[in-house]
Amino acid sequence: MDHMLQSQSGTVRWWELVFCFVTLLQTCPKFSFNMRFGPSYRFTLCRSELILLFLLAIALVLIVHQYSRAVLQQVSVVSSEPHYKRQQAPQHVATAHHAPPGHMGEPVTLPQEQGNIPDSVQEQIALGWQRQGYNQFVSDLISVRRELPDVRDPWCRDRKRSALPPVSIVIVFHDEALSVLLRTVHSVLNRTPPELVQEILLIDDWSSLVQLKTFLDDYFLPYSDKVRILRTPKRLGLITGRIFGAKRASADYLLFLDAHCECLAGWLEPLLELVASNQENRKVVAVPTIDWLNETTLALQVGASSGLYGAFDWNLSFQWRPRYDRLQAPQENLLEPFDTPVMAGGLFCIEKAFFAQLGWYDPGLQVYGGENMELSFKVWMCGGAIRTVPCSHVAHIQKRNNPYIGSYTKERDLTMRNSLRVAEVWMDEYAEFLYRLHPDYRALLASRTSHSLSNVNLDARRQLRSELGCKSFRWYLQHVFPEQDDPSEAQAAGWIRHENEAGQLCLTWPMRDRSLALLHCHGLGGQQIWFHRKTGEIAREGHCLGVDSGNKPQEAEVTIALCSSEGSSGAYRWLYRRQTGQLVNVASGLCLVPADNNFRVTVERCESADREIFTQSNRQRWNFQIDDI
């Protein structure tokens, strides 16, 4: 604030100078002086001309002054107490006393009280969220070359690696925030051996932001030996944009990154080693451990993704699952690469020839969504493998929304249309189950195939699958993802609904605290899809519904646990009486009912089906969405 006060007092002195100068001019009608340029000439400036020149000079000074005040005002938001508070860095990170914002992955936080932030800054913050789905204002405060800690395990750092081939890194962007895009590229340049980076291909997918045009070209001129900017002739979307870049890459190996990432120390070598080593008789796609860049503070948060594997639910949505629920015992060293049935999609390394052999991505997929399912299915089913590499760390911003798509409804429809196209080609008879579970999906697929931009023949993709000799989707479920609930092994499936005075309530799991709840039925599947297996278990995501009877019937409690750990215990098997809708626990003989608060479930003694009071509104009646698989 002292600087601002000095600037304001400086403004007064300028106007005093103007007053003195005008007074001087009143006493001097004109000025004459000699200037020599060869011959001698005499120039005379009239008072009016001199006043005009002086006023122009004063105007320039005022413009610079006002700009300086604006800059100082913005700096005060992030540097002056109490307007800016920086959380302490993790204990293992040593930082200087005056570390710049975001140094070593520290969070950058703004004051919670709106009154502490100038209106102009608030507008910038809101606009950044609207355009990007993350806090662009905070990103712009952080250096594009910021330092991050080395989070690798010592075992990873000490690994000796043989010579590796170079890679082409493909990054597709559309109207990405400049600071985020530059930070992504600099994280690659600064934390990768230069001999391993043949090129970084920045694919501009028809961006409209001015700073992503000529300025970006000029910025990367000093890096022209590594960075190439390619611009698409029209809006292609992320999926087709990656195909555009992959076909123009010059290296034998491709590595795809999102435009809002930061690569950490030693990130590339273990990925490239796994893909290029060819130690097996199959092609391997390598996926890094994905850490989190907080979308609000851009703090680096090293997650437990090395303890997770990629999966899908029967909405065909990607999800993370813990490695401990895998049926196959993990390898002794948990830092070694491990199999994952599905990749998250944005970050992976693949041999270019293998990608081309698989037909790249399906060109009928539009913009974004479902491409990770398609590539994952066909890699596994056509002779390859996907492995997560715990020694490789890439941090990623998970956007709250995709502004270039629009509303959540548009995003969901687009993603589901893409996913259903994948199902039609790769999921065989299991695609029909999706239509039974989600009746609206068939209409989505029909509207997609009639769309002029989406009418890419499915027969060509099916023909490609046949030529590659790919295995069936049933094989994939049995050998790659045996933990997934198999609809063909179920006697009933879908939501499990109870109707009472509170409305239609469905069993829902997991909640944020991993608990079981009874919530209003939303019809979107997800956490409300269950499978009643032919062996009696009611399962979801490898977890089974059970009853812990305790010492007395009134102490019985509904629980949920890993199915594999419980085996065929009667406590985790249920009998469904279709006539009455009762769900009877085999071991306890008790019936499932809503708890008194209507948002939990419990068990009680089963009522006789012969009693006259047993009606449609009975509290022990449940309905399955599909009860005749």
Image (spheres, helix red, strand yellow):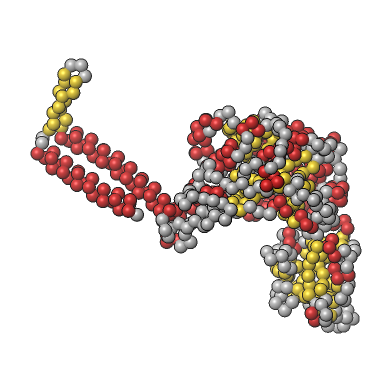
Say which quarter of the image contains residue 194.
top right
Is 71 above or below relative to 513? above
Counting from the top left corner in percent of width and height, residue 161 is at 71, 37
The residue under the point 48% across, 61% down is: 112
Q: Residue at x 26, y 51 (%)?
A: 9
Q: Residue 449 in the image: x percent, y percent?
A: 74, 44
Question: Splitting the image into 4 quarters, where does residue 281 fall?
Answer: top right
Q: Residue furthest top?
A: 39
Q: Is 391 in front, or is 186?
A: 391
Question: Looking at the picture, does residue 284 appear above or below residue 435?
Answer: above
Which residue: 61% across, 46% down? 150
Q: Is residue 368 above or below residue 193?
A: below
Question: Which residue sits at x=63%, y=48%?
Answer: 151
Counting every numbered tag in the picture gives 0
* Left or right of residue 180, residue 360 in this image: right
Asked whether residue 317 appears in the rendered view, the answer is no
Quadrant where the C terminus is found in the figure: bottom right
Residue 595, quarter of the rendered image: bottom right
Closest to the observer, 492 or 472: 472
Q: Position of residue 271 (x, y in %)?
A: 71, 40
Mark yes or no: residue 73 visible. Answer: yes
Picture coordinates of residue 603, whole percent (x, y):
80, 76
Q: Nearer the viewer, residue 393 or 309?
A: 393
